[in-house]
Image: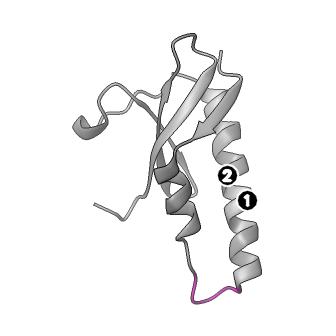
Amino acid sequence: MIERVQWSSESLRFLQSMESLRFTEDETSEYRRKLMHEIERKIITLGTSMPSKEEEHFGTYRVVVDRHKVYYSLGSNGTVAYIESIKHVRMQ
């Protein structure tokens, strides 16, 4: 059972690079915080029920949150999820 989520540098860089032409910086920061919280909640809730189907992410698990694919793996004891990558669904 997953008890906590750990973010990789790559996934944090992805979140930090999010910008919006329609929203203020404060609104975008708030969206980032909510997105992070929802990603963590969903990973803890779903656990290992969604193995990744993409060949480049073989051996990981995947959740989709607000049009973002989040790929993660588990630590050796299965209580820590390590977020490896986040991609918007429109990204190839």
The kind of residue on which mark 1 rests is Arg
Callout 1: helix, strand or loop? helix
Could you tell me which residue is drawn at 73 percent across and 48 percent down? Answer: 37
Could you tell me which residue is drawn at 25 percent across and 39 percent down? Answer: 56
**Position of residue 3 in the picture relative to residue 82 (left or right):** right
Callout 2: helix, strand or loop? helix
Q: Position of residue 80 (x, y in %)?
A: 61, 23
Residue 59: quadrant of the picture: top left
Q: Which residue is mark 2?
A: 36
Q: Residues within 10 Å of mark 2 (few under 14, many from 20)?
A: some
Residue range of the region highlighted in magenta in the rendering? 20-24
Q: Is residue 2 above or below residue 38?
A: above
Q: Which residue is mark 1?
A: 33
Q: Is residue 33 above or below residue 20?
A: above
How far apart in space, not on screen, are marks 2 and 1 (Cα)?
5 Å
**Position of residue 47 in the picture relative to residue 52 (left or right):** right
Quadrant for the N terminus, please.
top right
Q: Position of residue 43 (x, y in %)?
A: 61, 34
Outermost residue on the top side: it is: 77
Question: Residue 19, labelled with which disc?
Answer: none
The kind of residue on which mark 2 rests is Met
Q: Is residue 79 above or below residue 66?
A: above
Could you tell me which residue is drawn at 23 percent across and 36 percent down? Answer: 55
Residue 71: quadrant of the picture: top left
Q: Position of residue 39 (x, y in %)?
A: 63, 45
**Position of residue 52 in the picture relative to residue 42 (left or right):** left
Q: Are marks 2 and 1 in contact (CB under 8 Å)?
A: yes
